[in-house]
Image: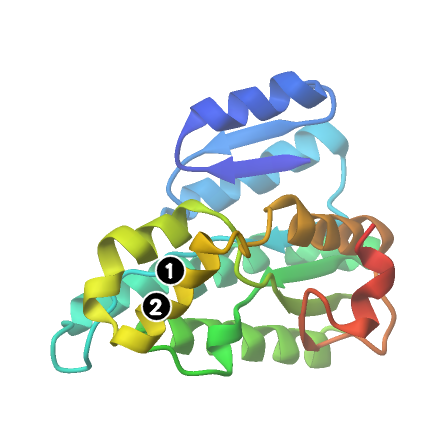
Amino acid sequence: MIAVARSSEKLKELASQYGEDRVGFVAGDVTDSQTAANAVNLAIEKFGHIDSVVLNAGVLDPVGKIDQVDVDSWKKHFDVNLFSLVDLIQKSIGHLRKTNGTVIAVSSGASTSHYSGWYAYGCSKASVNHLIMALAAEEDQISAISVAPGVVNTEMQQDIRDVFSKNMNQDTAKKFLDLHNNDELLPPLVPATVYANLALRGFSKELNGSYLRWNDELLASYTS
């Protein structure tokens, strides 16, 4: 596995935990095209092939009313949430064609539902769903799927409570606060297990091009 993140500290911990023979990593900004190139090159150098790509880059910022968030902030958001994904697909697709590989995108329920102030995030995740649908339709040698992970106990949730809630309406902010207070946020390992199993096992043509939630009955066999 090749892991990519902005900071090297967590990546080093991952490689140490699972062994450098199994885990390589690239520390870098996903909006820098060289980061994707380095990840692909390292995968080929270390393992000789690429079987699956999991697209997990994403930010929530900016959050706010349509007339209170400047377009440049939207562009920066899309650079992370959409264009970095396109870049990695483009750089890895030749290798994926050789292995009949898979592309698995981390989407969001916000791609199909409205959340107050989440204009950019909802739009970018809806675009990710379409990207996956189009990739599955046009690439016969590749399978692709988009999966929403549910509401997961991550730093993004903390940012929602501590930073972004002031830019949401009261009902939306309360929803996420209540999930936290009631201990109803999903542990990251729960949806991560689904993504890992999709990458390791592959999936049927029935699922190819789909957008599904992590707990959809069609993914039941991937939850453990």
Q: Residue at x 71, y 75 (%)?
A: 136
Q: Tag 1, which secondary structure?
A: helix
> Is 42 or 94 nearer to us in this picture?
42
In the displayed structure, 150 sits above or below 127; it is: above
Q: Is residue 153 left or right of residue 216?
A: left
Residue 24 occupies quadrant? top right
Q: Residue at x 60, y 47 (%)?
A: 187
Q: State the separation of the CA atoms marked 2 and 1.
A: 5 Å
Q: Residue at x 77, y 74 (%)?
A: 208
Residue 174 badge: 2
Q: Residue furthest front?
A: 182
Q: Tag 2, which secondary structure?
A: helix
Q: Position of residue 27 (x, y in %)?
A: 44, 32
Q: Residues within 10 Å of mark 1 (few under 14, many from 20)?
A: some
In the displayed structure, 210 sits above or below 37; it is: below
Q: Residues within 10 Å of mark 2 (few under 14, many from 20)?
A: some
> Is 144 or 36 nearer to us in this picture?
144
Q: Position of residue 90 (x, y in %)?
A: 56, 59
Is residue 31 visible in this depiction of the protein? Answer: no
> Is 224 or 88 nearer to us in this picture?
224
Q: Are marks 2 and 1 in contact (CB under 8 Å)?
A: yes
Residue 84 badge: none
Three-letter code for the amino acid on which mark 1 is drawn: Leu
Residue 172 occupies quadrant? bottom left
Three-letter code for the amino acid on which mark 2 is drawn: Lys
Q: Quadrant of the N terminus?
A: top right
**Residue corresponding to mark 1:** 177
Q: Position of residue 131 (x, y in %)?
A: 56, 75
| Display colour scheme | rainbow
